[in-house]
Amino acid sequence: VYSLAAPYSTSDKTSFAYVSARDRWPIIITSAIDDTYRSVSQCDSDAAREEGKKIVEELARLKYELQHDRQLTPIRDDGSPDIALYNQELELLGTPTWFNVPWLYSECYLYRRINTSFSLSTHWKDYDVFARQKINTFRSSRPAVLELAARYKEIVQQLGADQGKQIDAEREEAQKILFYEMCEICLWGNATDLSLLTSLTYEDIQKLQGSEARKASEKNILINDLDKAYAVLKKAKDAGQEDRRVDIVLDNAGFELYVDLILAGYLLASGLATLVVLHPKSLPWFVSDVLPSDFATLLNALSHPQPFYENPSEDEKLQGTTPPPLSLKEVSELTFLFEDWGCLHAEGQLILRSNPFWTHPGSFWRLPTADAELFDDLKSSELVVFKGDLNYRKLTGDAAWDPTTPFTEAIGPLGPGSGVNVLALRTCKADVVVGLQPGEDKKLRATTEDGGGDSGARKWAWSGKWAVVSFSGGKER
Ligand code: F6P
Ligand code: MG
């Protein structure tokens, strides 16, 4: 028997739920309107243009309803079975208004609802209203991308050269540290999420991404269970287990997907895994989340790095600026990445597996009953890595837990005994947090800049500056 603390609600004015609904969502809908409008103006066909205008109107209406605290209306049926889930839950919640509704449900509803304006159309069915933003931000993370490409090539070649060699204690320690570093790169890649871009500049993003920044950020990891995750993978490897799979429940496209692939490639090259399964979303989600098409877009950019980085973007054309050319070394490092990942993908060691469950409205507490097949599938993995803030909110039910609640308890049915080894790599961008030491939350509120003080708000946890890396051994009891 599990019990969940009370979920965060948009009615709680001290929560980021309220700030999100009031300030962030209107901006996100506006950016969707602008993007659609831009595509409408580039349309050749009259029919598509007319339909596009209708979509813009629908999005504007959604924004109006939100800002005027109207009731959430049932989502129109676009033929996908998840619509019924959304609407049943809406009814169970008593058809609430925008500023008095559980945060997790309403935010998922928002993206599902935006999507139906496109999915119900004829000409815009698969249109990704956030694609432009995703690829532009990836392009602007060029310095960190190049730095990591160079590092990746070095590491993979070194690991190749080390293969079959005797491993002494010192090397063993070095391998563990490398694992931590790769995971930390992957963790901080989550700090740059487009849905928070409303408050971060490109310069801020670049500062967040370099290796110096990463070292400095280590003190901002409040809980670090990477040793436990490493022990699990190392044990399977040393036992000579033939199939050793790691799953990554992806979060954002662009730079974060790039670092996820760096981690995946490293795990395969080091033999800590023999198969990596990536789980993308099936519809445009929380602005920046990965769709299968984002994976293709990223590989495509890496396969032709010069046109991607050197041809001026639409904005650069307007400003009359030209980006600096890539050096030959940089081109060869990016090409190395592309070939390495392309090869892993072609050989079936790196695969994508979509599932509609990831865009359901509820938390992951529902996984065992909502999708027993997916649950069983995850049990056959050595480690399931959940990236990012939303996945953490879903793991913990987005509930107002006492912050000292153990992570293993807050994830309910996915905790010990579930058969699933869970590792959350999360930069904090929402109120929920568990696994802290007694007094830690209070101290962070009081001592960090804009930490919330005694306002009753846990503001330190909203900015992506702090992180938690939490493990739960589901194969233990
Ligand atoms: O807290 C801001 C926010 O946009 C939340 O709405 C959401 O949980 C999260 O960030 C998305 O971040 P991530 O991409 O890390 O899941
Ligand atoms: Mg996201």
Image (cartoon, rainbow, N blue to C red):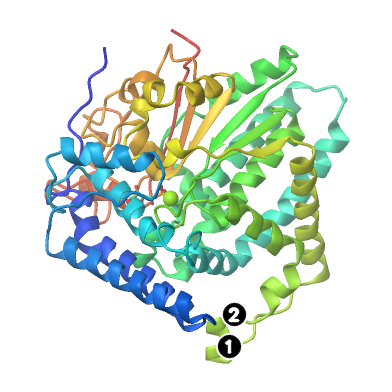
Are dots 2 and 1 in contact, CB under 8 Å? Answer: yes
Q: CA distance from mark 2 to mark 1?
A: 6 Å
At 17% across and 35% down in the image, what residue appears? 92
Task: Measuring from the top left, give residue 249's x and y in whole percent.
Answer: 51, 38
The C terminus: image quadrant:
top left
Q: Residue at x 66, y 20 (%)?
A: 234
The answer to whether residue 4 is visible is yes
Q: Is residue 7 above or below residue 14?
A: above
Viewer-proximal residue among 289 and 97: 97
Quadrant where the N terminus sits is: top left
Looking at the rendered structure, the secondary structure element under dot 1 is: helix
**Element under disc 2:** loop
Residue 467 at least partly seen: no
Label of residue 317 in the image: 1
Q: Position of residue 210 (x, y in %)?
A: 57, 58
The residue under label 1 is which amino acid type?
Lys
- Decide: is 35 above or below 6: below
The disc at residue 146 is none
Q: Tell me the amino acid under the disc marked 2.
A: Ser
**What residue is pinned by disc 2?**
313
